[in-house]
């Protein structure tokens, strides 16, 4: 049930002013429209950890909105580029970052989950033991980071290409992990309230504890293997 995944290229726009030049991070728009990816399972597949109602709303409404708004922002960017309208290009950066990040993050998140769960590969488990001591320790540390996100955001397990180690990070709102920290995303936990509130109310720790029962460790392991080769 997989569909094509589009990527956002990042580039720098140099803005010259009376006090010198500065660089503004922007996203280069892919000219092909982004589409909402299919889930690799049914909406009810993650019950009882994540309810059918939450999955329907989260995927068909929230993720769909990020995709739609990303396409709108990219059309505006295309027009601004054609006019060499640097001011508008700069002003579009927040919308591109928010909606592009939302699309990237959720496209990873859906595949990070599975009703089958599973276990980390031998290679990933070895790296987890080296960098965190044990799988239980990783879960505890990732849980703490995710619970500690103020407001909305994500808790992440990423791969640091420089140190060649696994590393944890938290990102606010829909800030994409790699563009924000340089870490390659391996496993993400969505802690926006729309991801859990209808079922877990304001008890975010219960949601995070439960979600480890449906982590797709096969997908996480594959992302780790690809990250090491990148």
Image (tube, rainbow, N blue to C red):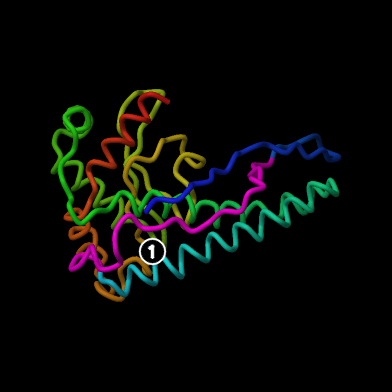
Image location (x, y in percent) of residue 80: 79, 51
Quadrant containing the N terminus in the rendered view: bottom left
- Residue 217, compared with residue 102, is above or below; it is above
Does the magenta segment cover residue 121?
A: no
Tell me: 22 left or right of 140. right
Judging depth in this view, the residue of 49 and 168 nearest the camera is: 49
Image location (x, y in percent) of residue 120: 18, 38
Does the magenta segment cover residue 41?
A: yes
How many labels were placed on the picture? 1
Quadrant containing the C terminus in the rendered view: top left
Residue found farthest to the front = 1
Residue in the picture at 82% in, 38% down: 16
Image location (x, y in percent) of residue 194: 38, 69
Q: Which residues are magenta?
A: 24-50
Q: Quadrant of residue 76?
A: bottom right
Tell me: 196 left or right of 28. left
> Which residue is label 1 attached to?
192
Judging depth in this view, the residue of 77 and 166 nearest the camera is: 77
């Amino acid at each position: 049930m997989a569909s094509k995944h589009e990527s956002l290229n990042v580039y720098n726009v140099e803005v010259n002013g009376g006090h010198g030049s500065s660089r503004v991070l922007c996203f280069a728009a892919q000219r092909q429209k982004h589409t909402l990816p299919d889930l690799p399972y049914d909406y009810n597949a993650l019950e009882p950890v994540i309810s059918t109602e939450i999955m329907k709303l989260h995927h068909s409404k929230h993720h769909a909105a990020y995709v739609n708004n990303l396409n709108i922002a990219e059309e505006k960017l295309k027009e601004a580029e054609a006019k060499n309208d640097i001011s508008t290009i700069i002003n579009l950066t927040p919308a591109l970052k928010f909606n592009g990040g939302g699309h990237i993050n959720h496209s990873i998140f859906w595949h990070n989950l599975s009703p089958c769960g599973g276990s980390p590969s031998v290679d990933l488990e070895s790296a987890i033991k080296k960098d965190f001591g044990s799988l239980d320790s990783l879960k505890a540390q990732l849980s703490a980071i995710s619970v500690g996100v103020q407001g909305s955001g994500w808790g992440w397990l990423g791969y640091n290409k420089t140190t060649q180690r696994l590393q944890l990070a938290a990102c606010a709102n829909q800030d994409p992990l790699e563009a924000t920290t340089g870490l390659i995303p391996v496993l993400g936990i969505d802690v926006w309230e729309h991801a859990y509130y209808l079922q877990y109310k304001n008890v975010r720790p219960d949601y995070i504890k439960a979600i480890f029962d449906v982590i797709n460790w096969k997908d996480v392991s594959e992302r780790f293997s690809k990250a090491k080769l990148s």
